[in-house]
């Protein structure tokens, strides 16, 4: 297992398509330089000891299909640029310490999103109705937050999804 900080020099690997550093003991913040790896399709940093906020620069990863940051100690709000990654299929930010409201644009620019996992965080406010625009969504996990609104279990547009809000 690796430990220490994720080296920002990874950004010199310009042809990198997949970066998986999961299940290690990396600490510190996610280097903003990872946003320069514009050919990345998969970024897996789950199950580490990462802290701080998601860098806005990750919104530069236009080809990103999978973003897995779950089970760290990440904080703050999710940068709106993450919800503009139109190639994203799977977004898992669960088991962190994110706060704030889910952005209204959550369903406007993610035409291919199939899985959205935001459970066990500290999100608050209403569940945005724009989630209904995620027509490819098959799995949505919002449980164990402080979200308000009706339980939305059931069918949503083209797919059947089950939303558990506790």
Image: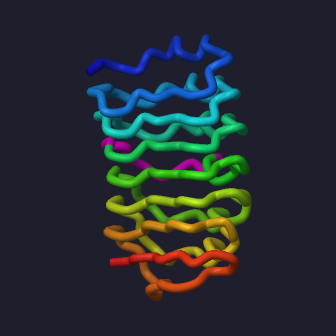
- Residue displayed at 63% across by 26% down: 17
Which range is magenta? 72-81
x, y percentage for residue 151? Answer: 44, 86
Instruction: Give residue 99's position: percent from left, percent from top.
Output: 40, 58
The location of residue 34, given as percent across then percent down, is: 56, 26
Callout count: 0
Q: Extreme bottom residue here?
A: 150
Front one among 46 and 147? 46
- Residue sitting at 47 percent across and 51 percent down? 92
Image-quadrant location for residue 65: top right
* Left or right relative to 58: residue 142: left
On screen, 72 above or below 92?
Answer: above
Q: Quadrant of the N terminus?
A: top left
Residue under the image location 63 percent in, 75 percent down = 159
From the top left corner, tell me how far across and down residue 144 is, in percent.
32, 69
Q: Could you say which is closer to the camera, residue 10 or residue 90?
A: 90
The answer to which of 111 and 76 lies nearer the viewer is 111
Above or below, 131 against 120 in this view is: below
Which color scheme did the rendering employ for the protein? rainbow
Give yes or no for residue 157 being in the magenta stretch. Answer: no
Residue at (57% x, 78% y) in the render: 160
Quick check: 128 above or below 92?
below
Q: Quadrant of the C terminus?
A: bottom left
Residue 78 on the magenta segment? yes
Establish if 69 lies above or below 143.
Answer: above
Left or right: 50, with 153 as reference point:
left
């Amino acid at each position: 297992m690796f430990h220490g900080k994720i080296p920002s020099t990874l950004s010199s690997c310009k042809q990198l398509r997949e970066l998986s550093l999961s299940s290690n003991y990396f600490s510190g913040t996610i280097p903003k330089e990872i946003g320069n790896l514009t050919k990345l399709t998969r970024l897996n940093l789950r199950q580490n000891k990462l802290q701080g906020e998601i860098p806005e620069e990750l919104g530069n990863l236009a080809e990103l299909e999978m973003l897995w940051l779950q089970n760290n100690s990440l904080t703050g709000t999710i940068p709106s640029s993450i919800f503009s990654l139109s190639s994203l299929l799977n977004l898992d930010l669960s088991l962190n310490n994110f706060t704030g409201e889910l952005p209204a644009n959550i369903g406007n620019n993610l035409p291919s999103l199939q899985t959205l996992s935001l459970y066990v965080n500290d999100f608050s406010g209403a569940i945005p109705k724009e989630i209904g625009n995620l027509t490819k969504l098959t799995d949505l996990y919002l449980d164990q937050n402080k979200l308000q609104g009706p339980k939305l279990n059931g069918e949503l547009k083209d797919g059947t999804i089950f939303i558990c809000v506790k």
